[in-house]
Image: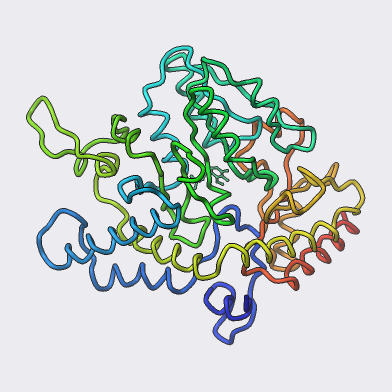
Amino acid sequence: MDIQKIRRDFPLLHNGAGQKTITYLDNACQSLRPSSVIEAINQYYAQSSACSGRSMHRLAAEVTRSCDQSRSAAAKFLNAGRKEEIVFTRNTTEGINLVANSLNLQKDDVVLLSDKEHNSNLIPWQVLSRKKGIAIRVIPSHPDNTFDLEAYEKCLDNKVRLVSLGSTSNLDGTSLPAAEVVKKAHQNGSLVLLDAAQAAPHYKIDVKALGVDFLALSGHKMLGPSGTGILYGKYALLDQLDPFLVGGDTVASSTYDSCEYLPPPEKFEAGLQDYAGIIGLGAAFQYLQNVGWNAIQKQELLLNECITSGIRNLPQLKIIGPADPKLRGGIVSFYIEGIDSHRIALMLDQMANIAVRSGQHCVHSWFNAHQIKGSVRASVYFYNTIEEATLFVTSLQKIRKVL
Ligand SMILES: Cc1ncc(COP(=O)(O)O)c(C=O)c1O
C-alpha cells in the first residue's frame, strides 16, 4: 500500500501545498473522507438533486438508479444474499432501534448483552425493559476485557430471544468470535444482532458465512458521509417485522383506516432519504474494497504496536483491554491515574494538533462499573502513518512530564 498516495485522496490530510495539517486519531468516532466520496455527494447536489423511487422524470430516474447501485454495493460488501436485505439508516443506533422496536419482544424475553456495550446497544433495550418488561442479561468479560465464550454459553437459556453484541468494542478495540457466537445462539434458538459499527471499517464481514440475523453499521466510521448507515437483516426475518418508522414510501396503498406495507427494504425506509449520503456511501464501499482488508489490518497493527510500545511504560498509565496490540485492532484506550482524560486530549490538540477522543466513549456503564473516570482513546485508520504514531507517543511523553 502506497500510504502517501492514499493520503493524497483525503483533503483533510493536506492543505493546498500538500503539507500535513492534522494528526487525526479519532477514527473510531468518524473516519475522514476521500475525494471520491465527497465528489459523489457534490455530484448529487449539483447534477441530479431529486427524489429516488417517486417521480417519473429523468433526474429522479438517475437518483433511483444510483441509490439502487449503492444498495447492491452494500449487499456485495457484506456478502448479503440479496440487495433487499439492505436497509439504509442514519447510523448504527437507528439500525439497533429498528430491531428493538420491530421484533415484538414480549415480557420476560431476555436480550443478552455484554458488559461493555455502547449506549446505542444498551439504552434501546432498557427502554423496552421499562415499556414491555423484557429482561436484560449481561455477559461478564474476562478480566482483560476480552469476550468470555464460556460465560456467554452459561448465559444462554430458553428465555434468551435475542443476543445483541458489539462485534468490535469502541472501548478497547477487542473483537468477539462472531461466527461462534452466532452458532451457539442459533443452537439455543436465539436470534443474533451484531453491532458492527467498529468492525465494518476494519474487517471483512460476510453475513452469509456468519449466519447472523441482523447487523448494523455506520457509514461515517468507514469513509462514508455523516449520518449514513445500514441495517442488514435476513430477508425472511425482515419480511415478518412490522416497520418502526412509518409514513411515505413505506406503503403500497392506504385507505383512511388501513394500509398495505411495501416489501423490505422499502417498508423500513420512511420518508425522503439522504440520497446524497446513500450515493456517497456506495463510493466509500468502493474505496475500501480497492484498498483491501489485508493492507488495512497490516497498517493498523503496525500503528497500534508503535503506540502501545511507546506509551505502556509511562508512570501510572493503564491501557484498557489486553496488553497485546494484536487483540485491540486500531484502538489504544488508556488512562493515567489522577489525571483528567479531557485535559490530556486538549493538550495533545494544543501542543501537536493531534485529535483523539477522551471521556467515557458512550460506554458509561462499563466505566461506572469499574469506577474509572474516563480514558483517552487514540484510534487509527489505514491512512495514518508511523510518523503520526510516533508524534503521538513523543507528545504524550512530554505531557506526562509536565502533568
Ligand atoms: C460499538 C459502537 N456501537 C454503536 C455506535 C453508535 O454509532 P452511531 O453513533 O453511528 O449510531 C458506536 C459509535 O461510536 C460504536 O462505537
Left or right of 358, for residue 44: left
Left or right of 232, for residue 156: right
Instruction: Specify the farthest residue to the left.
Output: 255
Q: Quadrant of the C terminus?
A: bottom right
**Residue for point 51% across, 28% down:** 186
- Of 3 and 35, nearer the camera is 3
The number of discs equals: 0
**Residue for point 84% across, 59% down:** 399
User: Is residue 104 depicted above or below 53 in this figure?
Assistant: above
Residue 335 seen: no
Residue 71 percent across, percent down from the top left: 33, 55
**Residue for point 55% across, 69% down:** 291
Residue 200 percent across, percent down from the top left: 53, 52
Residue 103 percent across, percent down from the top left: 38, 27
Give the colour scheme shown. Answer: rainbow
- Of 4 and 347, nearer the camera is 4
Residue 295 seen: yes
- Hey, which quadrant is residue 296 in on the image? bottom right
Left or right of 278, for residue 263: left
Residue 290 percent across, percent down from the top left: 50, 70
Instruction: Specify the farthest residue to the bottom.
Output: 17
Q: Quadrant of the N terminus?
A: bottom right
